[in-house]
Image (tube, rainbow, N blue to C red):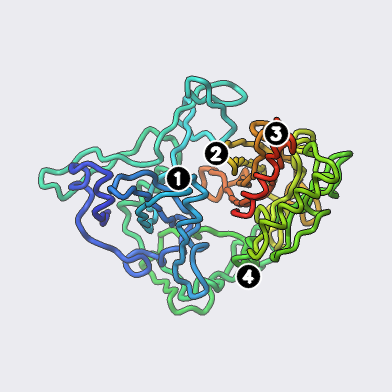
């Protein structure tokens, strides 16, 4: 398999390896190799970040490339959003995008148990950075899910690949497929059904006919071969997805008041106005009625003539409420078909990024959630809010919600994952009178910049 490697990619590997794997030849996905880019579940975009001297700083993998296409089916990527999500907030960078397809193996590593079998259960990382199974404590080791170059011919025109000690049928099947001669056919229109089951209501139907599509050609030479259905799944109706509706909503669970604590809706006014009861009323940051009005007046002043939302519409609470209740939330589906996710018994891991918007620092906290919701809710939960910095400066939280399903689409049972990123989800106001300094007003003044 030949790879085409550009100048910046070459800087990441040795001259020896570059001479082995590069022939300077390009292949076109959709013309020379299978489906067009973005149509395969194994396609991804690699975003490389360089400084102005050309030194590689970071490499970010962007899965599901189709989410970066516009209505004209052209790729449209905003690197600024991706940079900020990965901690790059200022500076000059050079950005490189590579559009890649995994043919065999993967860039993602796997964990192996003592029998060299792929381990997909819960695990813990110990203080010495060793990894063990959570329940048994047995050691695990990380290994690249790849193949290595075993030998290079004297003429440097052939290479011999070999497998790593991974005991997994899918891993071995992909390796064998690298040398197999096979015919792959695809439908002209990938959005239509090619296979029509004779009994579509049956869960175990094995009789079907092929739809009338002149690109699907079967002949006698195929007798004895394999008929493979790639990426078979139940099609969801996601036609209503858009830039303003990603299919999910993170909502406050219950009403604004939890006992004597209050979580306010936040500023939803894209104008100079602001609603006091939605922002600073009973906000619980050691403030009284007159001081809450003072924060309200500060917010009105910073919003003036901007047309922007304070904290970009984040829920607002005081540090007392944050310590006492955390953030009771609901992860809701905004499209009915996405509710099918509940049938897969998902687990949820939430990573909170607490931004100190006064000093420009961050801290990160991870929480696991497992309670399945009802109705239009996929999962109910409560996010504990770490105490670091809450009282002193307040924090504005971004949140990354990662839904994981126990059943994967591959035979090795890899887990599926959906990531939902919500910027500026919760604003926690600091102590109003801490050390005699009105930090809350400083926090509010910075809040208009987000």
Q: Are marks 1 and 3 in contact (CB under 8 Å)?
A: no
Front tag of 4 and 2: 2
Q: Earlier in the sequence, mark 2 or mark 3?
A: 2
Compared with residue 392, is residue 304 higher up or lower down, i.e. above or below? Answer: below
The residue identified by callout 4 is 239
Residue 188: x %, y % from top left: 46, 75
Q: Helix, strand or loop at disc 3?
A: loop
Q: Nearer the viewer, residue 241 or 260?
A: 260
Q: Earlier in the sequence, mark 4 or mark 1?
A: 1
Q: Position of residue 241 (x, y in %)?
A: 62, 66
User: Crowding at label 2, few (<14), some or many (≥20) Cα neighbours within 10 Å?
Assistant: few
Q: Earlier in the sequence, mark 4 or mark 2?
A: 4
Most foreground residue, 439 or 10 = 439
Q: Which residue is mark 1?
A: 170
Crowd tier of the residue under label 4, counting other residues whose Cα lies within 10 Å: few below 14, some 14–19, many 20 or above: few
Is 324 situated above or below 342? Answer: above
For discs 4 and 3, the disc positioned in front in the rendered view? 3
């Amino acid at each position: 398999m030949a790879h085409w490697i550009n100048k910046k990619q070459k800087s990441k590997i040795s001259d020896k390896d570059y001479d082995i794997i590069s022939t300077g030849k390009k292949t076109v996905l959709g013309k020379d190799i299978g489906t067009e880019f973005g149509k395969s579940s194994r396609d991804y975009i690699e975003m490389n970040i360089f400084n102005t001297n050309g030194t590689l700083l970071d490499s970010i993998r962007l899965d599901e490339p189709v989410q970066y296409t516009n209505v004209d089916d052209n790729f449209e990527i905003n690197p600024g959003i991706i940079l900020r999500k990965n901690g790059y907030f200022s500076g000059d960078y050079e950005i490189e995008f590579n559009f890649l397809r995994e043919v065999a193996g993967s860039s993602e590593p796997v964990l192996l148990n003592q029998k060299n079998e792929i381990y997909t259960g819960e695990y813990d990382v110990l203080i010495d950075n060793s990894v063990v199974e959570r329940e048994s404590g047995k050691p695990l080791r990380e290994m690249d899910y790849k193949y290595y170059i075993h030998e290079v011919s004297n003429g440097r025109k052939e290479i011999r690949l070999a497998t790593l000690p991974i005991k997994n049928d899918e891993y071995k099947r992909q390796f064998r497929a690298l040398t197999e001669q096979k015919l792959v056919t695809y439908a002209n229109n990938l959005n239509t059904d090619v296979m029509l089951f004779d009994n579509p209501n049956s869960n175990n139907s094995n009789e079907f006919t092929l739809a009338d599509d002149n690109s699907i050609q079967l002949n006698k030479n195929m007798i004895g071969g394999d008929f493979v259905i790639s990426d078979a799944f139940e099609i969801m109706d996601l036609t209503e997805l858009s830039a303003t509706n990603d299919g999910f909503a993170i909502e406050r669970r219950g009403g604004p008041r939890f006992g004597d604590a209050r979580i306010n809706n936040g500023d939803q006014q894209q104008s100079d106005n602001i609603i006091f009861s939605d922002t600073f009323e009973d906000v619980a940051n050691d403030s009284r009625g007159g001081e809450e009005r003072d924060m309200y007046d500060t917010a009105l002043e910073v919003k003036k003539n901007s047309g922007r939302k304070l904290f970009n519409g984040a829920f607002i609470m005081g540090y007392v409420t944050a310590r006492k209740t955390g953030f009771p939330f609901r992860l809701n589906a905004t499209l009915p078909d996405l509710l099918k996710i509940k049938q897969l018994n998902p687990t949820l891991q939430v990573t909170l990024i607490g931004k100190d918007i006064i000093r420009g620092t961050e801290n990160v906290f991870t929480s696991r959630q497992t309670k399945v919701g009802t109705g239009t809710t996929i999962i109910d939960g409560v996010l504990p809010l770490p105490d670091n910095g809450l009282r002193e400066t307040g924090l504005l939280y971004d949140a990354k919600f990662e839904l994981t399903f126990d059943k994967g689409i591959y035979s090795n049972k890899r887990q599926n994952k959906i990531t939902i990123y919500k910027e500026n989800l919760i604003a926690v106001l600091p102590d109003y009178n801490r050390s005699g300094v009105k930090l809350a007003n400083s926090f509010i003044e910075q809040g208009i910049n987000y």
